[in-house]
Image: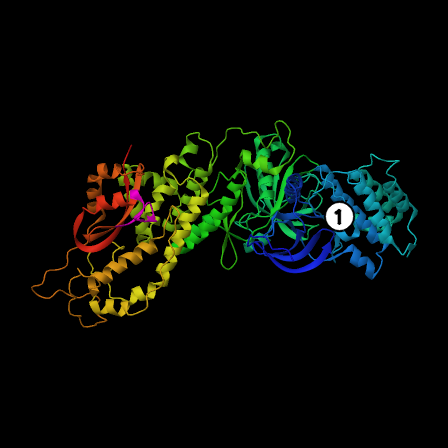
Amino acid sequence: MPVAPESPRFRVVERIDEEPGRSVYVARDERERTRVQLVALQHALGAAAAERFGREAKLLAGLRHAYIAGVVDHGIGGDGHPYFVREDEGGVSLAQRWTQAPLAIDTTWQVGLQIAEALMCLHEHGLVHGAVTARNIRWSDAGVARLLTAPRTDEATPDRSPRADLAQLGRTLQALMERDGDAVEPVPEPLRQVLELAADVAGRPELRAEELRAAWLAAGAEVWPHKLAATQPLLRPEPQVWPPAPDLLPAPLEPPGCRDAGDASCSASAPPRLFARRLELRTLLGQGKCGQTWRAYHHILGRDVAVKILPRTLARTPVLADLCREAMALDKLSHRAFPRIYECDYNDDGSWYLVEELIDGEPLARTIQRGPMEPLAAVELVIELAEALHEAHARGILHGDISFTNLMLERSLPPRPRIIDLSECRFLDAFYAATDQRYALTPRHRVEDGRAFGHPSFAAPELTRGGAKSERSDVYSLGAVLFMLITGAQMPNAVIRELLAAEPDEGAERLREHVVAAAPALADTFLAADFQDIVAQDPELRVKSMADLLELLRAERDALRSLHSDRPERAAAPAASASPRPRAAAPVSASTAAWKDMSSETPPAPRPVRRGPWLAGAAALAASMAVFYAMFLGAGPSAPPPSPPAPASTSAPAVAATPGEAAPAPAPTRPEVTAALEALAPRLRACSGVGKRLSLTLEVGGPTRLTEVNHVEVVDSEPRDRCIRDVVASLRFAGAPVRHALTLDLGD
C-alpha cells in the first residue's frame, strides 16, 4: 500500500481496485468532508513524464462538468510516487453493473449521450482520455454517468487521440448492449449505424465528439419519439422573453421584495415566471448595478438557487465583465465562505445570468444594527473570512469590496460568515498563469478599466484617491469590518479617520482607547493596539498580506480564549480598588491570602513560543503574573517579606489601608512610560536591526523588564534584543507593577 499524501487533507480508508501500474483507494477529504478516490502510481516518473502528469492534472482540476469526475488534487506521496485525487460520488462502474445484468438499450443510449458530452469538454480543452471503457464510467442510481479521468504520463501515440476516444466509446456502448456476443434485445438499426460510424476510424478520421453526440441523439429520437415527447416539455420548455412580454400575465407593479432569503415574507412574491427555460423566478431579493438577484427554483437541479440576471441593456457595458469575473472567481474558489456556482450563460433574449448557491441567512448589515458583537465571536468570524480571502489571494483574486453589504451570517450552529458578492473582484497575473486556459488577446473580463469601486465606509483610503486594488486594500476593508463588529460603528471609515486625524502616536492611542472603551476585554490583549497596523491610512505601514493578518488574529483569538477560560478564577479573586487603573494590571490591592490560594493550584504548562510576527497577549500576561507572585509571595531573593494576610471577606473586595500606613502608589501610566521611552529614542535607534517603528512590551513598576520586541518574545541571543533590553533597563518607575504594550515611531 503506497504511502498516503503528506498533506493531512486526505485520509486513506481502504483499497478498492488495482489497475495496471496504479492502486485505487477510497479516501476521506478532511477539508471538504467528502468521499474521494485516491489513485497512487506504483512507480516513479521521469522529469518529462512528471511535468506532463502535473500539467494535465492541473487542467483536469480546472474542469467543471456534470459528467466528468474531476481531479481534486495531485502531488507526490511519501514514497516518492505520484498520486492524484478525483471525485467519488458513489455508484458502481458500468463494468460491475454489466456483470449483474445487461443495460437496457434506452439506458445505454443515455450513457452514450452523457459520455459523448464529457468527451466534448475534454477535447475542447486539448485533453485526451485514452481509456473510455466501462471500467472508467461510474453509474449512479439517479441515472447519471460520470467519466473517470486520469492525468497522462506517457507520450502521445496514434491510439491515444480524440478520434480514438470516440472509437473506444463506440466499442464500449456496443459491449454494454450485448453479452457474450449475443444481443439481449435487438439493437435498433439507427443506433447500430452510429456505432459503426464511431468504429470507422479509417473512413471518418475527422469525426468529432459533438458530431457523434448529434448523430446518437438523432438516432434515439428516431427510435423512441414517444419518450422524447414525454420529457421534452419538462426539460426544455418553450423559451420566454425576460422580462415577460406585455401580453403575458404581468407581475404586480411593485413586486414585493424581501430583506433576505430566509424571511417568511419571501413567501409573498410575484407570479412565477420561467427564465432560461429552467429557472422559475419566485422572489426578487434585490437590485443593483448588475441587474436583479432572484430566488429561483432550478427545474433540472431540483433545488432553490440564487440567480443574478443582467438585462440585455447592460450586456455591452463593463458590468458584463464584472459578472464574468465573478463567475470565474467562484469557479476557482473552494472555501466554504464562498457560494457554489452552478452555471453562467446568456439567454435567448440577450440577457446574461449567473446561478449560484442560495444562502439562508441574515445580512451582516442587519446583524450589526442590534449592537456590537462579543470580541471573541467577532474575531472568530473575521478569521474565517480572512481564511477565505487568503485562498483567493493565493489564486490571484482580489475581492476589492469587502463590506457589511456583501457579507451574510448563514443560519447554522455556529453561524457561518459567507461572502455573497464578488462583482468587484480583480484578477492578478497569477490567476491567468494558474488557469491554463486559452484567452483572446483582449478578453472582455480581463480588461482593467481603471475603476476602483468599494463601499465608502469600508474601502481603503488609497482607493478613494485613485489607487489600485491590492492585498493590503482587502486587509484594510476586513479590518474595518472587525472594527465595526467590535465597536458597533456602522460607518467605520468615518470613525477611524477621525481617530487617526491627530499625530501618529496620539492617533494610535486614541484608536486603542476607543476600541478598549467599546470592548474592555481587549485591554488584556494586543488587538486594540494592533488596529493601528490593520487600518493604517498609509498602505506601506499596513499589515502587508492576508496571511499576516490571519496569524495576528489567530494569536488574538488564543489570547481571548485564555482570558475566557480564566474568567471564573479572575471573578473569584478580590477585585481591585475603585481608583482608575489600567486593565492590563493585576489587582494589586488583593490580599496575600487570595494570591496564595491562586498559587496553590498547579500552574499550566508554558505555551510554545510563537515565532511569527505577532504574539498573543496571553504569554505576556502569564509572565506578568509570575512577577506578581514573586512580589507578593517572596519568590525571589530580593522580594520584600510578605505582609500578614488580611481576613477573608466577601463583602469588601479590597483591603483598606491600616491607619498610619501609606496607600499603595498607583501603577505607571502609558503616557508616562511612552514619554520615558521617547527620551531614549536616539539610543534605541542606534541598535542594529531596529526599523522605523518599534513595538515593545515592558513590565514596569520596580526594575523595568523587556518581554517582547515587535510582538515576539525576547531572545537573549539576538543582538538587537540585547541592545534594546540594556537601553530600557535604565528606566525606573515607582508604583505597582504593570505591563504596557507600546509602539514607538523612531523615524528615519
Q: Which image quadrant for residue 58?
A: top right
Name the residue carrying label 1.
235
Residue 581 at x, y percent in the picture: 22, 55
- Which residue appears farthest toward the top when viewing the image? 441
Residue depicted at 7% across the width and 64% down the height = 660
Q: Residues within 10 Å of mark 1 (few under 14, many from 20)?
A: few
593 horizontally vs 216: left or right: left
Dot 1: what SS?
helix
Residue 583 at x, y percent in the picture: 27, 55
In this rendered view, identify the residue nearer to me: 553 or 38.
38
- Please tell me whether residue 585 is drawn above or below residue 530 in the rendered image: below
Q: Which image quadrant for residue 442?
A: top right
- Please tell me whether residue 491 is drawn above or below residue 439 in the rendered image: below
Residue depicted at 26% across the width and 70% down the height = 597
Query: What segment carries the magenta color?
Result: 706-720
418 horizontally vs 158: left or right: left
Residue 559 at x, y percent in the picture: 37, 55
User: From the image, which quarter does the N terminus lie in?
Assistant: bottom right
Residue 325 at x, y percent in the picture: 58, 37
